[in-house]
Image (cartoon, rainbow, N blue to C red):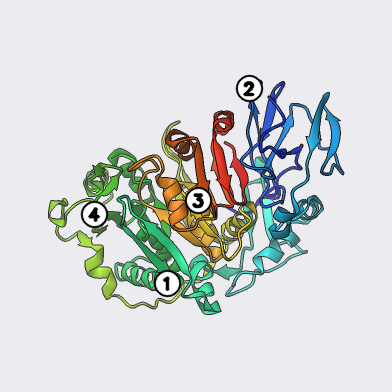
Amino acid sequence: MPPAVHSFPRPLAHNWTSGASGRWCGPISGSLRVVSEVGFRGGVHSSRVLTMAPGHEVRSVRPGAHVLSSPVGAKFVPGAVSGEAAVVAGQEEELVAPSEEFQATALVASRAQYDEMYKRSVENPDGFWGDIASTFFWKKRWPVKDGKVHTENIDVRNGRVAVEWFKGGQTNICYNAIDRHVEAGLGDKVAFYWEGNDLGVDASLTYKEVLEKVCQLANYLRSQGVKKGDAVAIYMPMLAELPIAMLACARIGAVHSVVFAGFSAESLYQRILDCKPNVILTSSAVKRGAKIIKLKDIVDDALSRASADGHTVGMCLTYDNSSALKREETAWTEGRDSWWQDIVPSYAKECDVEWVDAEDTLFLLYTSGSTGKPKGVLHTTGGYMVYAATTFKYAFNYHDDDVYWCTADCGWITGHSYLTYGPLLNGASMVVFEGVPNYPDAGRCWDIVDKYNVSIFYTAPTAIRSLMRSGDEVFLAVLWLLACSTDIIELIAQMRLITFNFSNFVLQMFGE
């Protein structure tokens, strides 16, 4: 989706950090509002506000680690600095500025810098986002009319509701995510550290290797008649081939529709019937913990239902995930099904880029359907590319030497934006994990953090709770930033039970 005018959030309400003891000064009295995004390496960034029950004592992770919050009804007190006390909404609180250590590496290093960026993004969104967009490669630059790079209508009385960014400009998100870095001399940098479900099963791919695999798959898709604007369904586990498949579609202008490989045959069938792909990419099976899920059986069921309803998928490319299921045990339809490893490696490792308009469709991602029929949300190329890259860069304060890990599945928007496109557009090295956080034990996530020297870890409360179950103390020498998605209220209340021994640490939370 194109960047919104309000993409940078409202000003912060109040900034708290820990005292020298590494704890809050005492139990919280009264209701507490917890700002749902927390400062990055000394920068400040916030959005939605959640309410937490009174009476909880919250322990921060270490002295100097930053948590942002405010009492109900509090207002930001300009000019508050370290050691300064202020009465806010009738309560006396200590306002503590970010430490110099954190500020030294922050991309947004001060409140003043944040305010300046935010002010420009609101008052001059075309200039703000246009300048950022100019840092990417465009085959053809977008036209500027009266200083505008976007048009919008959100009033149904004035016609069709539409917001368009950089229309008329031509680019390709795959080129910007992969080729651009290889051409800049980063071809040998690791793009993916892949960690399998089972211990000891792993691999890594450099940007150059990813580019070659993307090109081979893109050439295969073209050989099957897939062209610009065509839909390709993807129903795969968290193999490195999943983001590679997304990039291959984007390279040739095809529209990928990733379906979470935990959804049923009925759910997959509904999405196939709606977007009508001629090709589906899947895997023989996946192991989630000790459980084997036969994905190909689910695909066959969905394809049979779709065919009965009038749409036949002509090709099913299946990745042989032999660690989960043997080939001979995989359901097969001759003439339609092909093994990925038997065909794709034979294609050329170079593939011409399809340059697309900024407003051409990049992908479809369907709602879960929990409130009715799944609805396909369409994301276009240019605005999404600029927004995903920028929010990743600033929200996670990404630096070139960071190793990043997002535990989301690519079947969700978080996996699209913050496991695939956002990190790759910034040239990041990231972990892709096939398994579940509590297999073979509750410490698996933290073992992976140590194994790959992960410095930025973006996850859900489930993973944090697994840490709680594994003991009351964890040492992670490299981790710098822990970002947490979804409901954080209970999590924060529980975190008082944990002692984190992190070398340098910022807790960042994205509340839902």
Q: Which residue matches tag 3?
A: 378
Amino acid type shown at disc 3: Leu
In this view, the mark in front (4 or 3): 4
Residue 222 position within the rendered picture, expressed as x and y whole percent measured from the top left: 34, 70
Using the rendered image of the protein, determine whether residue 315 is visible from the camera's viewpoint: no
Q: Which dot marks residue 323?
A: 4
Q: Which residue matches tag 2?
A: 53
Q: Are marks 1 and 4 in contact (CB under 8 Å)?
A: no
In this view, the mark in front (2 or 1): 2
Residue in view at x 77 percent, y 64 percent: 147
Between the C-alphas of marks 3 and 2, the distance is: 38 Å
Q: Are marks 3 and 1 in contact (CB under 8 Å)?
A: no
Whichever of labels 2 and 1 marks the residue nearer the N terminus, that label is 2
Between the C-alphas of marks 2 and 4, the distance is: 46 Å
Residue in view at x 65 percent, y 20 percent: 55
Up/down of 392 relative to 440, above or below: below
Q: Foreground residue, 18 or 187?
A: 18
Up/down of 354 relative to 57, above or below: below
Q: Secondary structure at mark 2?
A: loop
Between the C-alphas of marks 1 and 4, the distance is: 25 Å
Amino acid type shown at disc 4: Ser
Q: Which residue matches tag 1?
A: 211
Q: Secondary structure at mark 4?
A: loop
Whichever of labels 3 and 1 marks the residue nearer the N terminus, that label is 1
Between the C-alphas of marks 4 and 3, the distance is: 35 Å
Q: Which dot marks residue 8?
A: none
Between the C-alphas of marks 2 and 1, the distance is: 50 Å
Using the rendered image of the protein, determine whether residue 139 is visible from the camera's viewpoint: yes
Amino acid type shown at disc 2: Ala
Up/down of 153 relative to 167, above or below: above
Image-based side of 289 in relation to 113, left or right: left
